[in-house]
Image: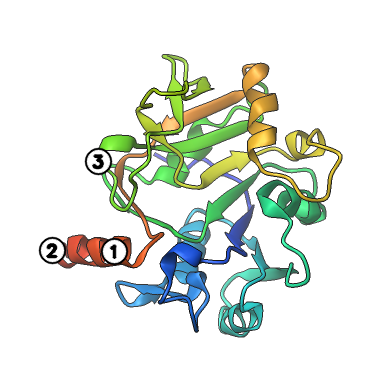
Amino acid sequence: MAKVAGPKRGMIMAAGLGQRMRPLTNDCPKPLIEVAGRTLLDHAIDRLKHAGVRMIVVNVHYKGEMVIDHLKKRTDVEIRIQDEREKLLDTGGALRKALPHFDGEPFYTHNSDSIWLESWGENLQRMAERWDDREMDCLMLLAATHSSIGYDGRGDFTMDADGHLAWRQPQRIAPFAWPGIQIMHPRLVKRGPDAEVFSTSKLWDIAAEEGRLCGIRLDGKWMHIGTPGAKAEAEAFLGLRDTAL
C-alpha cells in the first residue's frame, strides 16, 4: 500500500529553558541532550524527515548559538532557524512568527523533548492518513497517560468515538496526554490572540469550540524527556530493546 503524502513542512520547538532538566542543561541546551547516543533534536529531525518533511523551522533561545552550530551539520534536510534569543514568544507566538515558512499549507510541529518507539505502524504516516483539511484545523498525536515514560501528569484530553477532543475536566484524570506532535493548518494560527506572545493552547481552544480539534492515538511507547530521571528511565527502557527509534 502506497504511503499517503503528508505535510512537507514542519517546526521543531527547541526554545525552552530546560529548567527541569538541570543540572544537565547548565552547560547544554535541552535539545542537544543525548538519548540512546543521539541528540533529542536529531531524533526529531530524523522523524520528520522520514515522514517526508523537506523543510524544518527550528526556534532557538537558551544557548541558541550551540543549537545553531549543531544544526549546521544537518545538510540532509532544509533547516531554517527562527532566532528567539532576544525574546521568548511562547509556543503560539513562535508558530505565528513562523507562518511565512509554511506557504499556507498544513505543517507538523514536534517538541524537541519527545521520542517514541513505533509499534505496528508509523505514527506520522498514520496522522497523514487521518488528516482531513475539510473537517479539522489541528490533529494531535495522543499518548496513553498511564503507560508513558517520564510523564506524571493527569492527562490533557478526552477523545470521542469520532476523534474529537475535549480538555480534561478539573479534578479528573484524562486518558490522553499530548506528546508535542500535531498537524496544524496556518488558518488556525492566524485566528489566535492579537499578541506577540501566547500559548498554543489558545489555538486549541478555538478549534475545540468549533469541533475542529481532533486526535489520533500514538501506536507505540512515548517517552517524555523532561527531567534527568526521565532520561535515565528512557535509556534503561531502550537498552532492553534493539528496535531503533
Which quadrant is the C terminus positioned in?
Answer: bottom left
Q: How many marks?
A: 3
Q: Earlier in the sequence, mark 1 or mark 3?
A: 3
* Residue 3 visible (yes or no): yes
Quadrant position of residue 137: top right
- Amino acid found under the numbered disc labelled 3: Ser
Q: Identify which residue, 187 or 237, lies in the foreground.
A: 237
Taking the spot 56% from the left edge, 78% from the top edge, the residue there is 74
Instruction: Indicate the amino acid at tag 2.
Output: Leu
**Residue identifier under label 1:** 229
Q: From this viewpoint, which residue is outermost toward the front?
A: 171
Give the residue furthest to the right: 194
Secondary element at tag 3 = helix
Residue 57 quadrant: bottom right
Which residue occupies 67% across, 22% down?
A: 134
Amino acid type assigned to the residue bearing label 1 in the image: Gly
How far apart, in angstroms, are the residues tagged by discs 2 and 1? 17 Å
Determine whether label 1 and label 3 are within 8 Å by CB.
no
Q: Which residue is mark 3?
A: 147
- At label 2, counting other C-alpha atoms closer than 10 Å, the crowd grade (few under 14, some 14-19, many 20 or more) is few
Residue 244 in view in this figure: no
- Camera-side mark, 1 or 3: 1
Rendered view: 102 above or below 173: below
Q: Nearer the viewer, mark 3 or mark 2?
A: 3
**Dot 2: element:** loop
Asked if residue 135 is positioned above or below residue 40 in the image, the reply reads above
Identify the residue shown where x is 39% and y is 32%. 176
Q: Determine which of the numbered discs, if any, sits on residue 240 in the image.
A: 2
Q: CA distance from mark 3 to mark 2?
A: 17 Å
- Badges 2 and 1: C-beta atoms under 8 Å apart? no
